Amino acid sequence: MIYPTAQAWRDAPNKHVCLFAMSGLGKTYVSNMLRDAGGWFHYSVDYRIGTRYMGEHIADNFKAEAMKNPFLAELLRSDSIYVASNITFENLAPLSTYLGKPGDPARGGLSIEDYQRRQAQHMQAEALATADAVRFIDRAKQLYGYPNFICDCSGSLCEVVDAAQPGDPLMTELSAHMLPIWIKGDAAHTDTLIKRFDRDPKPMCYSPDFLVNAWETYAEGRSEAEIDPDEFVRWTYTKALAHRKPRYAAMAEWGVTVEGKEWESISSEADFVDVIAAAIERRTARS
């Protein structure tokens, strides 16, 4: 680890960390809090995906829908209007809308082939956007004068890396420049995430093998037109929570683990420094 002891972490004039966890456990909330405190550059992998690597796909999807309207189609053809994504750190809906959900087209579903194609685009974009974080450490310091850097990773990073392999290139690069931090939710957090997702199911990014298995299991004996897209992603989300837990645990071996309750206690930069120091102490004590 780049901070081998809690004291080394506290004394470091430049603190560089990357956060990973299931979406909804507070990565972005704490990242925004540190940014607002001053001295911290907040790098959002999801924002980078949606702007740098998926922006053209997202805009083209909007345009394809607009072209179905004769009035808007004529304006687009004459360059009288333009269609663009207004993605922000807090609003990633344009990216989620593009990823979509497979199933009955009458209920807004995509064909499984189109869904898999968009998933593959996202997986590639996520690997590139996460790797970019290392370059942004120097950029944030040299251009903007931020001494500290927090990388807010996508919840699906665990699908991109193989952290159980000591030589995983992306984990090797990240851990060489930042302290990986897993925000580990408990059973209560899992129940909350499932209920929240059930109320408002959102598109997710899955590894190809997991997605194929989930689709074949759920859709067995049924056609795409018989699949409710929302019901499929609800069912798959629950499976994904269990699937991702050991993958997150393997990633945590490259850094430290913070329990969800600890994370919820953070309300200031000083709290953040203390919580991470305690996590490093636990890590060094068992090493």
Image: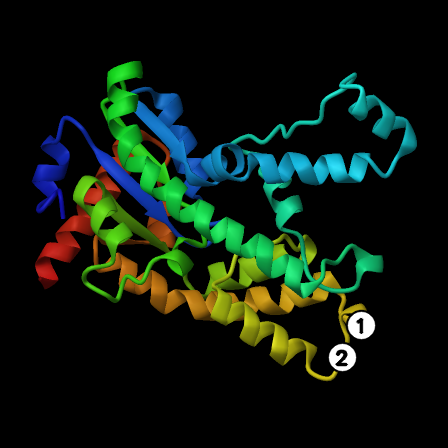
Q: Mark 1 points at which residue?
A: 226
Type of amino acid under label 2: Arg
Q: Residues within 10 Å of mark 1 (few under 14, many from 20)?
A: few
Coordinates of residue 70 in the picture (x, y in percent) = 91, 32
Residue at the location (44% across, 38% down)? 28
The answer for how far apart the CA atoms under marks 2 and 1 are is 6 Å
Number of numbered discs overlaid on the protein picture: 2
In the image, is residue 182 above or below residue 229?
A: above
x and y percent of residue 203 in the render?
61, 53
Which three-letter amino acid code belongs to the residue tagged 1?
Glu
Is the residue 252 above or below the residue 62 in the image? below
Residue at 16 percent of width and 56 percent of height: 282
Q: Which residue lies furthest to the bottom in this view?
A: 221
| Residue holding disc 2 | 222
Q: Quadrant of residue 163?
A: bottom left
36 relative position to 112: left or right: left
> Considering only vertical position in the picture, is 58 above or below 193?
above
* Residue 187 visible in the current orientation: yes
Kindly check if marks 2 and 1 are in contact, taking CB atoms under 8 A apart as contact: yes
- Looking at the image, which is closer to me, 205 or 271? 205
Q: What element carries label 1?
A: helix
Q: Where is residue 63 in the image (x, y as percent from the top left)?
A: 74, 34
Q: Which residue lies furthest to the front in this view?
A: 78
Q: Can residue 265 be seen in this view?
A: no
The C terminus, quarter of image: bottom left
In the rendered structure, the answer to whether residue 274 lies left or right of residue 100 reads: left
Q: Which of 167 and 56 is in front in this view?
A: 56
Within-10-Å neighbours for mark 2: few <14, some 14–19, many 20+: few
Residue for point 63% across, 69% down: 235
Q: x%, y% of residue 125?
A: 46, 45
Q: Which colour scheme is used?
A: rainbow
Q: Residue 67 carries which label?
A: none
